[in-house]
Image (cartoon, rainbow, N blue to C red):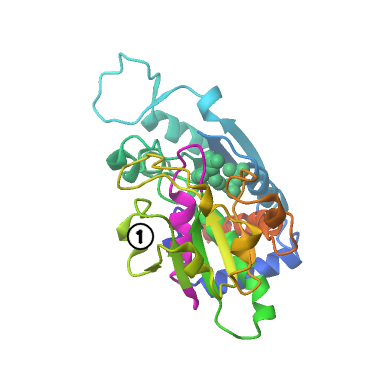
């Protein structure tokens, strides 16, 4: 069993329920991971993913090995049949097989390059490990998705449902400005997760910032952010670069920043963001520091999202 995409979740309701049970009793399955090792391979920076996945593994009694591959590893070659006389020192074929001997699970963070759409869509790093490793693979944010984040977001949404007293929620995914070109992975996985929820789901972004149409599918798009916010119960904010004009920052329209005024259009909506977030660019201090902000709890739920995934993989290994 791998966990590389939101599509690997067979029932979002069941997974969220089980993750919430783990949150209540995090040490209940402490012998499940005895003598098992997880390798966390980072090709990009991280705070939450690194610590929450390590914490999740620890709660299950596993040992963790962390490698910042971008700084500490040999530069890997992914292409088959190539003469390796340039900068790359080691082929994914050997690297993945060798790591598989040390680790029972391999988790990988490898962001989109945002330079070559086709190469990013091919998920060269994640799929290279999937192909050549002999152990289960977990996606800690790849070019296309961040399924551990989406599962944590589903847990966070579920925790808030009681206050809606059975009413179907309106959830808005809003683009917000950012000075740097950011990947689409978080937004993609959030969209895929929301497509499995019983909710009124709307995506809002300026023209030119359309996400991959294959992922958006028939999800509703509203180009007027103010209109999208009306009646919303949850505002999930994220910046992403253009997908059509691949990896480009078309503009940083600050009128899209999530402010108190914007939030006043909603139904006292809760504010969500995966973090890290740039204050007063993506969202104002007033919103981020308000009682309606769920960002710290979202980060907390990363542990239980990862713990559920690792528990399912370990149970599968023990079968
Ligand atoms: C990354 C992104 O947008 O994909 C990671 C988010 C979890 N964010 C930044 O690079 C700022
Ligand atoms: N949300 C998230 O994945 O954060 P990090 O990039 O810090 O891991």
Q: Magenta segment range?
A: 177-200
The answer to whether 89 appears left or right of 105 in the picture is left
Closest to the observer, 171 or 59: 171
Decide: is 62 above or below 128: below
Quarter of the image for residue 116 reads top left
Left or right: residue 253 compared with residue 117: right
The one nearer the camera, 298 or 105, is 298
**Residue in the image at 47% along x and 43% along y:** 252
Residue sitting farthest toward the top: 85
Asked whether residue 242 appears in the rendered view, the answer is: yes
User: Residue 95, position in %: x, y?
Assistant: 44, 30
- Residue sitting at 50 percent across and 76 percent down? 199
Q: Within 10 Å of the Cα at label 1, are there few (<14), some (14-19), or many (20+) other Cα atoms?
A: some
For residue 5, which quarter of the picture?
A: bottom left
Q: Is residue 51 above or below residue 228?
A: above
Residue 98 spot, x, y in % from top left: 47, 31
Whether residue 251 appears in magenta in the rendering, the answer is no
Residue at mark 1: 215
Q: How many marks?
A: 1
Task: Tell me where residue 142 appears, x and y as whole percent.
Answer: 45, 45
Please, which residue is most extreme toward the left here? 81
- 245 vs 40, nearest the viewer: 245
Q: Residue at x 52, y 34 (%)?
A: 44
Q: Secondary structure at mark 1?
A: helix
């Amino acid at each position: 069993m791998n966990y590389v995409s939101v599509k690997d979740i067979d029932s979002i309701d069941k997974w969220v329920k089980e993750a919430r049970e783990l949150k209540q009793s995090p040490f209940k399955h402490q012998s499940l991971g005895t003598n098992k090792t997880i390798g966390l391979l980072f090709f990009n920076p991280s705070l939450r993913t690194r610590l929450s996945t390590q914490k999740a593994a620890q709660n299950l009694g596993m040992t963790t090995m962390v490698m910042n591959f971008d700084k500490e590893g040999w530069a890997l070659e992914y292409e088959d049949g190539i003469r390796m006389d340039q900068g790359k020192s080691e082929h994914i074929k050997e690297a993945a097989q060798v790591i598989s001997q040390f680790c029972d699970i391999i988790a990988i963070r490898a962001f989109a390059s945002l330079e070559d759409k086709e190469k990013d869509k091919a998920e060269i790093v994640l799929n290279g490990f999937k192909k050549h490793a002999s152990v289960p693979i977990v996606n800690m944010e790849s070019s296309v998705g961040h399924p551990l984040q989406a599962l944590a977001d589903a847990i966070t949404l579920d925790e808030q449902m009681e206050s809606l007293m059975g009413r179907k929620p309106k959830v808005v995914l809003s683009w917000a400005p950012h000075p740097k070109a950011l990947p689409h992975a978080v937004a993609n996985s959030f969209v895929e997760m929301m497509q499995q929820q019983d909710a009124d789901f709307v995506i809002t972004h300026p023209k030119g910032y359309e996400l991959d149409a294959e992922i958006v599918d028939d999800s509703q798009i509203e180009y007027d952010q103010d209109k999208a916010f009306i009646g919303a119960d949850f505002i999930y904010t994220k910046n992403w670069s253009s997908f059509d004009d691949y990896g480009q920052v078309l503009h940083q329209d600050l009128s899209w920043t999530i402010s108190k005024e914007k939030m006043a259009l909603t139904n006292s909506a809760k504010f969500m963001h995966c973090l890290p977030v740039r204050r007063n660019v993506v969202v104002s201090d007033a919103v981020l520091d308000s009682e309606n902000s769920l960002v710290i709890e979202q980060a907390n739920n990363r542990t239980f999202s990862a713990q559920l995934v690792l528990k399912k993989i370990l149970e599968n290994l023990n079968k």
